[in-house]
Amino acid sequence: MKKIVLWLLTTALLLCCAGCTSGSVDPSEPENADGRLIAQQISEGAVPARELAQTVLTEYLKEREAYSPLGNAGELDGRIVIFTVFASGTDYSWDFSKQEDADQKKKCLKDLSEAAAYLTGQAAKYGRDVEFLYDWEEDPGLAAEYSAGHPMASAASTREIAYELASARQLKETYGAGQVIYLFIVNSGPDNTKHSHANSYDPQKTGENASFMDLIEYAKINLHSDYEGERWDAQSSTYAHEILHLFGVPDLYKAGPLITQEYADHMDAVMSTAYYPDIMYGGVPGWSAWDHVFSDVDAYYAGLTDTCEDVEAYGLGKSQHIADQ
Ligand SMILES: [Zn+2]
């Protein structure tokens, strides 16, 4: 759960996110949602959509077996495609003929650019040479507009759009990249109560039991949201935080599969007196990604280092980047 804390007289807003945890379930989603969506499309006469869905699912299953034990965003290393989806639904939408939306799109690129530079810089400290391809002004093929017949606040909209996207394997081939991230950007209004979140690949969800959405990794950035009565606007630290989730880094402000409650409490204590927040702990409105600490814990879970004092001292979970013995 998010919360607001006082931070050196500045309101600090913890970034995210009910949906951050790998494998989390959106309670608004029915079980077997893939099947329901396909059934709905059939009932609407959209049989080609069903065929498309099956084709794409087959494509992703092939990719998982062939390339990506950690999903489409595996290693924070080398060339990484960020394919941006300007996503419109029945609640929030984009209209780039409007100056306001065109300006917002430019701000998205600025924030994403800052986040990419921040992550590249952090990885370089650990000897990794990361190159993010994301600039849709340089290469229009790196972004596209998509519309869904569902509210963008629901995961059903993401699923509906995802079926239409080029697969990670196709994008890797096109750009000579080793990793792919899908970034959904939602032009949400300040009344939106959903937070930005990330859908990380869960290695437990594999084989025939995997749904299409289990097999792709994406971050969904909600540009504006109401956070317990306070307005929160996505900023570069939001992008960096969500992208790190896709490479396996957990939230550090709450207990989860990798983080103990003791460590979350420890982080609360440390962060209450720290000037700069950890990128996976929280954010301060208006602060750049560069104003956030990238700790050894973050590096450990991102696969940049195999050892980490805090992980050992607090008995934290093992990084997905370290193979089972
Ligand atoms: Zn998070």
Image (cartoon, helix red, strand yellow):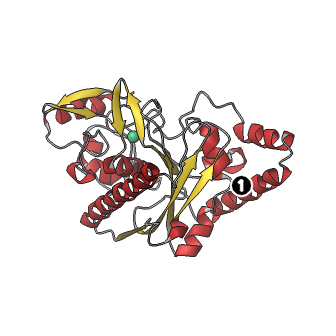
Q: Position of residue 246 (x, y in %)?
A: 46, 51
Instruction: Residue 261 in the image: state x and y as whole percent.
Output: 33, 28
The residue nearer to you, when weighing 215 against 158, is: 158
The amino acid pointed to by label 1 is Leu
Residue 157: quarter of image: top right
* Rendered image quadrant of residue 273: top left
- What residue appears at the point 59 percent right and 27 percent down from the top-left corner? 27
Please indicate whether residue 175 sits to the left or right of residue 190 in the image: right
Q: Name the residue under label 1.
A: 57
Residue in the foreground of this view, choosing between 23 and 287: 287
The residue closer to the viewer here, 49 or 312, is: 49
Instruction: Classify 10 Å Cα crowding around label 1: few (below 14), some (14-19), many (20 and above).
Output: some
| Left or right relative to 103: residue 292 | left
Image spot of residue 222 (x, y percent):
45, 41
Q: Nearer the viewer, residue 30 or 232?
A: 232
* Residue at the extreme top: 229
Residue with the most extreme front position = 98
Q: From where the camera sits, is residue 247 visible?
A: no
Is residue 4 visible to the viewer in this orientation of the structure? yes
Residue drawn 19% across the image and 35% down it: 271
Q: Check the image and report above or below for 74 versus 176.
A: above
Residue 264: horizontal and vertical position, in percent? 30, 32
Q: What element does badge 1 sit on?
A: helix
